[in-house]
């Protein structure tokens, strides 16, 4: 694991794992926000076209 960390420019495995955990938490927060926004739209009976939904989904998944 330390070898992978060094290859990625990190001091050690713990730094690599910390960064990975923070990235995971950030992505989860983005996903939850998008779900809540979608629920709010649905509650207001505001829907979007499929093409717009696809574009938003792709944007949400972009690193």
Image (cartoon, grey):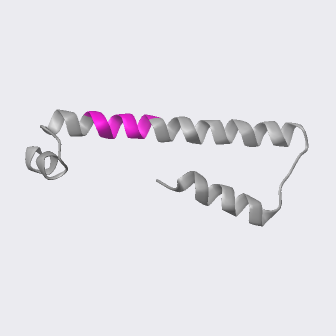
Instruction: Classify residue 41 by image quadrant.
Output: top right
Our reading of the magenta stretch's main secondary structure is helix
Q: Check the image and report above or below for 32 versus 63.
A: above
**Residue 27 location (% of width, % of height):** 49, 41
**Residue 20 location (% of width, % of height):** 32, 40
Q: Going by the picture, which residue comes out furthest to the right? A: 45
Q: Residue at x 34, y 36 (%)?
A: 21
Q: Is residue 20 found left or right of 34 in the rendered image?
A: left
Q: Is residue 7 found left or right of 42 in the rendered image?
A: left
Q: Is residue 54 found left or right of 32 in the rendered image?
A: right
Residue range in magenta is: 18-25
Instruction: Classify residue 16 by image quadrant.
Output: top left
Q: Residue at x 58, y 42 (%)?
A: 31
Q: Check the image and report above or below for 46 versus 15.
A: below
Please check the rendered image and state whether residue 22 is part of the magenta-colored stretch, yes or no.
yes
The number of callouts visible is 0
Q: Going by the picture, which residue comes out furthest to the front? A: 9
Q: Residue at x 30, y 37 (%)?
A: 19
Q: Going by the picture, which residue comes out furthest to the bottom? A: 51
Q: Residue at x 51, y 38 (%)?
A: 28
**Residue 35 location (% of width, % of height):** 67, 41
**Residue 36 location (% of width, % of height):** 70, 36
Please check the rendered image and state whether residue 27 is part of the magenta-colored stretch, yes or no.
no
Instruction: Classify residue 34 by image quadrant.
Output: top right
């Amino acid at each position: 694991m330390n070898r992978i960390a060094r290859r990625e420019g990190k001091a050690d495995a713990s730094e690599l794992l910390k960064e990975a955990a923070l990235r995971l938490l950030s992505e989860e927060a983005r996903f939850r926000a998008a779900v809540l926004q979608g629920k709010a739209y649905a509650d207001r009976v505001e829907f979007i076209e499929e093409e717009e939904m696809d574009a938003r989904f792709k944007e949400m998944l972009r690193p």
